[in-house]
Image (cartoon, rainbow, N blue to C red):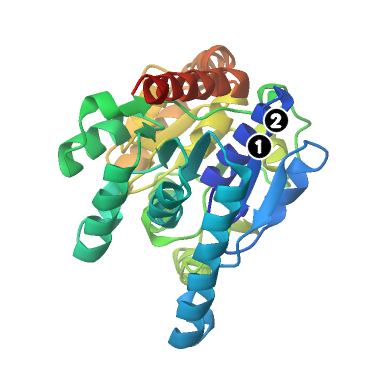
Amino acid sequence: MICELGLGGAEKQITLLARELSERGITTDLLVMFGRGPREEELLGSGVRIVDLGFRRRKAVTLLTCLTANARAFARLVLHLWRTRPQVLQTFLFHSYLVAAPAARLAGVPVIVAGRRCLGDARRGRRLAFAAERMATRWTDSVVANAQAVADDVRRNEGVPASKITVIPNGMPRQDLEPAHAATVETPLPLVVCVANLIDYKGHRYLLDACALLRSRARECTLLLIGDGPERAPLMAQAQRLGIDVRFLGTRTDVARFLARADMVVLPSLHEGCSNAVMEALAAGRPVVATAVGGTPELLRGRGVLVPPADAAALADGLQRLLDDRELANEFGRRGHAWARANLSVAAMTDRYVSLYRELLGRRCAA
C-alpha cells in the first residue's frame, strides 16, 4: 500500500517489489490511496492488481467532503483486506502506514510491515503527526528501513526497539544495471547531472551557488536538472541572476540516457533516506558528489565524494576535485558500478523482504 504511483523513489521501489513478488508466484495487490500514476504502466502484464481506494486530499475539496470521502475509503480498505485475507500488508510512506495499521488490525491481517524511506526530520516539529506515527508503529510487526541511518533515526527518536527494525536497501531493475545509450546534450563544458524533484530539502539552491563559484574559478560546467516541483520558478530566477548554464529538463522517464552522458552526478540534499538517484548514478558508472546525509554515506563510502549539506563552497570544492582529477573520477565510477551490480539488484532486495515476511508469519503462527 502506498499513497500513489508517481515517479518518486518510494513509488519506484514498491512497484519493483510488487512486480518481483508477483513473478515469484506470490499473489500481490497494490493498494493506492489517492490515485494511480505513471508507474502503473510498469506493472502492465505483471499480474499485480492495482486497487484505487479513493482517499481524497484536503487541498482539493472542502473539509466535509474530504472527511466523508476518506471515511468511505477507510471502510473500503478494511472490507478489501477482510475479503482478500492477505498474509502480509506492506506499506510505504507516512500516510500509507498511518491508515493501514488500524485498518489491517480491524481486518485481522496477520502481519503488518511499515517501510521507512527517510529520516523523521520533517515531522519532528509536528507533534500530532509524530504522535500518530508512533501509535501506528506500535500496531506494526516490523519497520523496514532502507538505510542504517534511517534505522538509527527510528530507534533513537521514536524508541522503537532494534529487534523490530530491519534494514533492507533499495533495489534496482535489471535494465538499470546495464549500459544505456547516451543522450545528446550540446555543450562544450563538462556536464553535471542532478536527478531530484525541485523541492526545498533537495538543496538545489546550494548547487546553483556552487556552480557560480566554479565559474568564478574558471571551472564552468553545464548543469542538467532532471525533476520538477514548486522550486522551479525561484531556481530558474536564481540561475539567470548568477549567469550560469543550467538546463531544466523537468520530469523524465529516460534518466539513464542522461546519466550515460554525464561527466559526473551531484545530489545536494539536506536530508535523505536511501537515494535512488545516487544508486542509479553508481549503476551507470558515474562519479558522484553528494551531501553526507541519511543513507548516502553508506552508498558512497570509498566510491564517491561526500560533502556537508547546505554548504555551497564545499559542494563546489567536491565538484572541482573530480573535474580536476579525471583519473580519480573514473576510478570512483568503476568502483561504484561494480558495487551496485553486486549489492543493489531488485532480486536481492526481494529475497530479503520474502525472508522477513516468512520470519514474521512464523512468529505469528507460533504465538
Q: Are marks 2 and 1 in contact (CB under 8 Å)?
A: yes
Mark 1: amino acid: Thr
- In the image, what residue occupies the spot 39% across and 26% down? 364
Mark 2: amino acid: Ser
Q: Which residue is mark 2?
A: 22
Label annotation for residue 28: 1
Label annotation for residue 103: none
- In the image, what residue occupies the spot 42% across and 46% down? 214
| Number of disc labels | 2
In the depicted structure, whether residue 226 falls above or below residue 363: below
Q: Farthest residue to the right: give it.
A: 45
**Left or right position of 116 against 44:** left
In-front residue for pair 86/58: 86
Q: Position of residue 93 (x, y in %)?
A: 44, 49
Q: Please, what secondary structure does the residue beneath circle 2 have?
A: helix
Q: Position of residue 212 (x, y in %)?
A: 42, 54
Quarter of the image for the C terminus: give it. Answer: top left
- In the image, what residue occupies the spot 42% across and 52% down? 106
Occupied quadrant, residue 227: bottom right
Q: Residues within 10 Å of mark 2 (few under 14, many from 20)?
A: some
Q: Position of residue 47 (x, y in %)?
A: 77, 37
How far, Cα to Cα, is label 2 from label 1? Answer: 6 Å
In-front residue for pair 357/153: 357
**Looking at the image, is mark 2 or mark 1 earlier in the sequence?**
2
